[in-house]
Image (cartoon, rainbow, N blue to C red):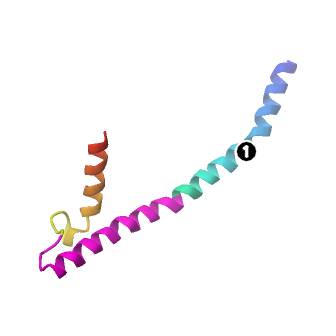
């Protein structure tokens, strides 16, 4: 009986730490996903500008005006790594 009470008290003490760890992971995710998306679309913008400078059409194969091109590039990159 005392062992069960001891285990339950330890679990109750660990609950705030679990919430803190979850909040930290959530903060990291909410920071890095927009960062990665902005980098992907800045790469698309760079490719479009360079295509315009060189009088090429640029990346416009996937989606409307090539807006899905960074996503397809990411999928292709992960596919090559695996």
Horizontal arrangement in the rendering, residue 33 relative to residue 18 (left or right): left
| Residues rendered magenta in the picture | 30-58
Q: Position of residue 2 (x, y in %)?
A: 87, 20
Rendered residue at 59%/58% (across/down): 27
Task: Say which of 50 and 6 sits in front.
Answer: 50
* Residue to which mark 1 is pinned: 17
Rendered residue at 21%/68% (across/down): 66
Which picture quadrant has residue 79?
top left
Quadrant the C terminus occupies: top left
Give the number of marks: 1
Residue at the farthest left position: 56
Q: Position of residue 25 (x, y in %)?
A: 58, 51
Horizontal arrangement in the rendering, residue 35 relative to residue 67 (left or right): right
Task: Say which of 53 and 12 sits in front.
Answer: 53
Residue at the farthest right position: 2
Which picture quadrant has residue 28?
bottom right
Q: Is residue 28 magenta?
A: no
């Amino acid at each position: 009986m005392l062992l069960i009470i001891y285990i339950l008290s330890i679990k109750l003490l660990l609950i705030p730490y679990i919430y803190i760890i979850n909040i930290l992971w959530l903060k990291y995710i909410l920071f890095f996903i927009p960062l990665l998306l902005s980098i992907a679309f800045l790469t698309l913008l760079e490719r479009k500008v360079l295509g315009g400078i060189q009088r090429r059409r640029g990346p416009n194969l996937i989606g409307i005006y090539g807006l899905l091109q960074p996503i397809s590039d990411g999928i292709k990159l992960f596919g090559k790594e695996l």
